[in-house]
Image (cartoon, rainbow, N blue to C red):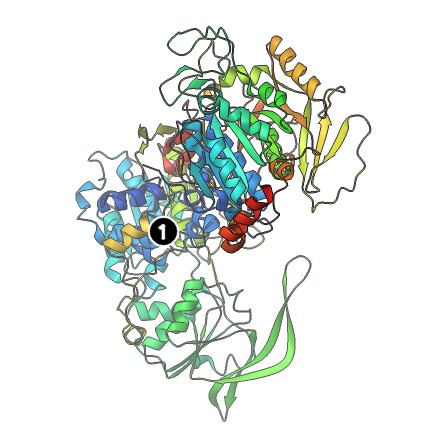
Amino acid sequence: MKKTDVSTYDHFLKVVDCQQACPAHTPVPEYIRLIADKRYSDAYLLNWQSNVFPGVLGRVCDRPCEPACRRGRVEEEPVAIFRLKRVTADLKDDISARLPKAPEHKNGKTVALIGAGPASLTVARDLVPLGYEVTIFDRDFKGGGMMRSQIPAFRLPESVLDEEIDYILNMGVKTEFGTPITSLHKLLKDNYDAIFVGTGAPKGRAINIPGVKEADAHIALGIDWLSNVSFGHNDKAPKRVVVLGGGNTAMDCCRTAKRLGGTDVKVVVRSSYAAMKASPWEKKDAAAEGIDIIVNHTPKEFVMKNGKFVGVAFEQVESIYDRGGNRVLKQTGKTLFVECDLVLVAVGQDTSFPWIERDIGLDFNEWGQPELNDKTLQSSIDKVFFGGDAAFGPENIITAVAHGHKAAISIDLFCQGVNPEQRTDSDFALISQKMGMHEWSYQNITDHEVRHAVPHISWEKAVKELATEVELGFDDQLALQEAKRCLNCDVHTVFTESTCIECSACDDICPVDCINFIEDIPDNTRPAQELLKGKLHLDKATDEQDYLISDKLKTGNIMVKDEDMCLHCGLCAERCPTGAWDMQKLTLSNVEATIK
Amino acid sequence: MSFAKSKFHHKNLPVNDLGLTYRDYEGAISTLCAGCGHDSISAAIVHACAELSIEPHKIAKMSGIGCSSKAPNYFLNNSHGFNTVHGRMPSVTTGANLANKDLTYLAMSGDGDSASIGLGQFAHVVRRQLNMVYMVANNGVYGLTKGQLAATSDRGVKNKIGDTSLFNDIDLCVMALQLGASFVARCFSGDKNQLIPIIKAAIAHQGFAFIDIISPCVTFNNHPGSTRSYDYVQEHVTARAVTDFVPIKEEINHEVPEGKFEDVCLHDGSIMRIHKLDANYDTTDRFKALQDVERHKAKGEILTGLLHLDPTAQHYHELNNTTDTPLNQIKQDLLCPGERVLSTINDSFR
């Protein structure tokens, strides 16, 4: 069989489920170990290096790491990675002195960043320490983009956001806030060496149904309404509010409306509860605050009575999935009328590029998105790069950060006259963690505790205060307990064929039966999973991980380890008499360069 | 530090008829040397018992003294056990077996415990055809006392410090065959595909089942010049048949191919299916088995697999016509009917 390629980091990085799932490849297990060591500042900086906004993301990240977490496969619930990230921000000391600074001598290159959201800020953070002169433009008067305008303060306190934005701006970024860019053509004439577009997806989608014109004064687009609340232009909501849509913006709208005086707040969504786009925890929190979520209803009409807006009429629908897995809504014939005074529309948002002239050589695709090189985020004008929601449509903050890193590398190469496709990959090292007979430099005893819940203020109090954060975060004790649940997937089981004596001690001790010694299969072409079916102790429980396949051993047999269920407990290495198994920690010299 | 094995197990782990996984048959984490063959034997016993769905409390683990005899601590945590005096395990097992014939007796002994201090006990328990599984973890060295030559060390081999074995070795399989054991096998700890089915068959077999398991001592007998090292055994091991164990409940629905296969029905109705690699292989012929072992040894090979099986042989309880009810379940007044009955019996002899 084809031996697993262990000459690159690809196999190993994939084994670290959380790190692989994080768009910015944050080295999660490493910072969790630092938390367990109470080295909060170090843990924060390790986070900051890859995801730039640990305090923000520790509160509002979409946390793709958690569904990926190995713990979810071997136990029930993943490690509360995102809660631990917040711990690093909450419990750190003053780290400002440890942050990189702009060099005294600049490199003479200038970069313009359009939009001051997470993508642009990441580009600035990556480029300023290299000597670039960076100017950041935004139509708002403060940086942060959607993190400030769309995320309410009860989920993300302004002070946390300000702190992390200031870390970047204080490095010496020139800011042009309150300055919307109205023409890319004009900006191109300003002779910046590179331009980065991080303007997000700022346009809320409207709903065109009967009555929309007549009821106009009672309908608002969710993101605009939230933005007005954030910037203090709006501090009241009527008693009866209906939110249309089932995403996280809808959840933020309904919870904000409740805090601004809404007593009867309903969310109406056309999908089923399970298919709602909002994160499960957002739905749970909204429900805990007493918000009704009415599912399977699509709006039919904004109803006026005697020239006065009275509410919204809905039709009940059923979600049916066709063979291609596409959702088709089928009307059941039942209707529903919901009385209300205000409708917040949160059914999606789009990018908006009216300020980019269509005749300046910047190509757009059929969906009105810029044509980009996936690898480099470069547009058809070679000095213009895109990132964040502006690049491929709405995603999330951590994806915007990853785009920022990727674009920063491209811009740096481009400004040096190198084709941005000629990127250097990250170096990697695997370092043995063995300290003695039964001693490892990591906690290898598997903790059997279940996931710890985060404490929060009482729901009664929560719905009264707009700027009071609901979640309290883990304290040091809870953090320590949760940190212990991490399986240290970045400490890899590394196998050396030449020293194995095939005693099967590792196979015997493995708690999850992932190690197998089998006869070699003379087939290099078909996929491993097909060839190995029925040949191992147990077939794969999930397809999330690959096999680690060895070269031929002395007897001609091969070793096949299923990475899927491995607990990284190191018992294989402890029971190995010859050190053929070793527990080695993966370190990448440049995490950003691994973002593909 | 990890002297604990995680309780987490693979999500696809099968459960047996009792709803237990093999993990429920495990013991304490082993304190034997890393890479010890005995740990592989423990693992094989765990799997065999789980696959046979034996209730753990219906098993008694019997052992004497030595690394091998420590091993029962590392399997079947919920079974009975007796760690006896050195070399005296057969006597204690005989007593236990007499009192309760309903238990499965799994005995784990070593080359010192059975071939040296316990040789006499070993010989007599074979003769008596006690219904038990007698396993010897044979590493050809006294590992617990730091590597002296054992009675099963081959003549001419050197131990780790360089002492040469001057004497002939004792081959326990040959002894068992001579003394009439009805089930004799030799296995290698590193080959579980062979070991597990043979342990299962030995448990199903009603009578004395002996398995000599070559189990390399990774610390004191794994050097060049040893004939019990992993390398040497892997290079010199040979088998004349591949055995598989088919439990009673599984229907055999495909025809046994002519010539190469042989099905042997065991006492309880389960089947040992033997895939012959050597056409002359015959498990019923005890004399041939004796010759084969010696011939292969003369060629420098280690013959493994099932060497001899006589499913019709009578075991100790049958030979003695003991009661069907285990003694521990017979009420005291019946078991010890008192002085009046005794004097009636005595009177009958006058």
Q: Image check: A369 left or right of A162?
A: right
Q: Quadrant of residue A19?
A: top left
**Could you tell me if residue A298 is visible in this image?**
yes
Q: Position of residue A399 (x, y in %)?
A: 42, 49
The correct choice, above or below, for A514 with respect to A216 in the image is above
In the image, what residue occupies the spot 32% across and 73% down?
A459
Tally the marks: 1
In the image, what residue occupies the spot 56% across and 75% down?
A298
Q: Position of residue A373 (x, y in %)?
A: 50, 41
Q: Image check: A575 left or right of A135?
A: right
The amino acid on which the numbered mark 1 sits, given as a three-letter code, is: Ile
Secondary structure beneath dot 1 equals: helix
Q: Position of residue A581 (x, y in %)?
A: 43, 28
Q: Which residue is mark 1?
A: A81
Q: Quadrant of residue A452?
A: bottom left
Q: Nearer the viewer, residue A21 or B239?
A: B239
Q: Residues within 10 Å of mark 1 (few under 14, many from 20)?
A: many
In the image, what residue occupies the spot 62% across and 20% down?
B178
In the image, what residue occupies the spot 76% across and 29% down?
B261
Q: Nearer the viewer, residue A425 or B61?
A: B61
Viewport quadrant of the C terminus of chain B: top right
The correct choice, above or below, for A174 with respect to A272 in the image is above
Residue sitting farthest toward the front: B350
Q: Position of residue B60 (x, y in %)?
A: 49, 41
Viewport quadrant of the N terminus of chain B: top left
Q: Nearer the viewer, residue B239 or A230?
A: B239
